[in-house]
Amino acid sequence: MSSPSRSRVWRRWCSVADARLWQTEAVSTILVTGFEPFGAHGANPSEGLAKAVDGRRVGDHTVRSVVLPVHHADAADRLAPILDETSPAAVLHLGLADGRARVALERVAVNVMDYPLPDNAGYRASGEPCVTGGPTAYFATVPLAAMLKALTAEGIPAYISSTAGTYLCNQTLYWTLHSVNGRPRRPAVGFVHFPLLPAMVAGSGLEQPSMDFPLMLRALETILGVIAGDV
């Protein structure tokens, strides 16, 4: 027969264990990724945006942010264990697209790597598949129309884009959609391209559109709010 004190300890341990189990089950993650700088760019706003929302609570979800390398193989290698670890409710990739004046909500990822410039390891893919034997394309599974409506209501210039390019951005979106395709609990997956920062344009001497960081961050917060309410 156990002593009263031992019973109290056991009940207390069970209560703590139950609370921890409840917390584990209740915590839901939205995984946000950005990219490091690449090419001639000394900065990448997607990196700063991802870091700015890391750890935030959005509805019933907590944001977990990761910065990916601009590398043909290492980006997926970095992402794969995090997907397994977090089992996120949604995955939102962020990237930089110079020449675009608005926030671009990407509709589709195609199974081709045709880099317009080398990655940060000096590798330049030329017409290779993102996943050998994979489908021609995958559509993003985040609520694009609702995201666009919310951004427009906030006065943030945005549009739904039908091409994520053929660089690491498209490759990462395709890889993630392919990776989660067979999972019993598939997260919603999307990609958002942001314009250059004003300082990046000023330093280039080129005629390029730009967007300041606070507006980009407001756009990301708006998008996360829509996704959190949908998953």
Image (cartoon, grey):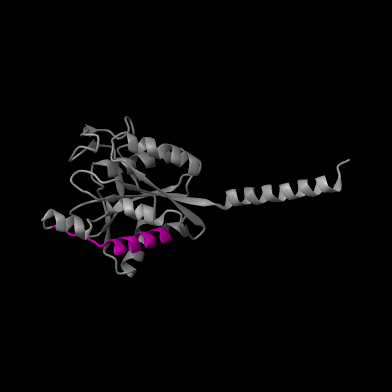
Quarter residue 128 falls in: top left
Q: Is residue 212 magenta?
A: yes
Q: Is residue 165 visible?
A: yes
> Which residue sits furthest right?
1
Instruction: Report the predominant secondary structure element of the magenta stretch.
Output: helix
Compared across the picture, whether 133 is left or right of 61 comes to: left
Residue in the picture at 49% in, 60% down:
59
Q: Nearer the viewer, residue 35 or 80?
A: 35
Q: Is residue 192 visible?
A: no
- Residue 168 at x, y percent in the picture: 27, 41
- Residue 203 at x, y percent in the picture: 15, 55
Q: Nearer the viewer, residue 66 or 6?
A: 6
Q: Is residue 183 magenta?
A: no
**Magenta range:** 208-226
Q: Work out which quarter of the rendered image holds the N terminus and state it.
A: top right
Compared across the picture, whether 203 is left or right of 107 comes to: left
- Residue 44 at x, y percent in the picture: 26, 50
Q: In this picture, is 12 found above or below 82?
A: below
> Which residue sits furthest front?
5
- Residue 38 at x, y percent in the picture: 23, 44
Residue in the picture at 35% in, 59% down:
220
